[in-house]
Image: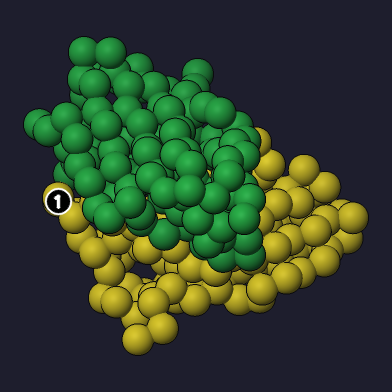
Amino acid sequence: QQQVKQSPQSLIVQKGGISIINCAYENTAFDYFPWYQQFPGKGPALLIAIRPDVSEKKEGRFTISFNKSAKQFSLHIMDSQPGDSATYFCAASIRGGSYIPTFGRGTSLIVHP
Amino acid sequence: NAGVTQTPKFQVLKTGQSMTLQCAQDMNHNSMYWYRQDPGMGLRLIYYSASEGTTDKGEVPNGYNVSRLNKREFSLRLESAAPSQTSVYFCASRPYQGFAETQYFGPGTRLLVL
């Protein structure tokens, strides 16, 4: 059973556009929601993360929006750049303990110049 | 500070051969993880080690074994490789149990089993 559903699987946007990737989760015990960015041939790296006590977190051009009642969260990339072309993974986890995050299946983002 | 390192970077095996993927971290992290990444499947946890001396199965442990050699090193062994194990393998580490949530990933090992 897939606990974190990510969409779309792939996304193509023009330079300067807004990229939006969505994730939905089922386990209401999840209390930490990170996004990872992975460039071709590299390992994933933490991009931005949010906890459910806030509805939005912004870091530069990257924003996470969180809707606890809908059990959904999304990544918005404003003014998308070709250098943002990568695969993005959402994840959800329960803080503390053994910390085993559940990952979405990933979104391949291509930003055309 | 090299972070998380993995060897080898790329390997080709024949069905039935065995090999060990090596992972080391120099950040004094307690927890270490092995994932496999397949197209469209995201990151799936194979095994993890919450702390030195402990290992536990993840989502897809069949066909793999692990050893937490010391705090720095966590190896993944394929005893009898199968074509279904063709994948990219990532090792990750995390500072300590508790509320430090960030995982740090290595560059990956690309494995092809013929």
Chain depicted in green: A
Q: Nearer the viewer, residue A4 or B85?
A: A4
In this view, the residue farthest toward the bottom is: B1
Locate residue A13: give its quadrant. Answer: top right
- In the image, residue B98 above or below residue B90: above
Asked whether residue A89 appears in the rendered view, the answer is yes
- In the image, residue B13 above or below residue A113: below
Colour of chain B in the rendered structure image: yellow
- Residue A35: where, in percent of width, then height? 37, 45
- Residue B75: where, in percent of width, then height? 52, 67
**x 48%, y 48%: residue:** A16
Label 1: state its secondary structure.
loop
Q: Amino acid at mark 1?
A: Gly
Q: Residues within 10 Å of mark 1 (few under 14, many from 20)?
A: few
- Residue A43: where, in percent of width, then height? 52, 62
The residue identified by callout 1 is B98
**x 29%, y 77%: residue:** B27
**x 53%, y 61%: residue:** A83
User: What color scheme is it?
Assistant: by chain
A68 sits left or right of A110 in the view: left
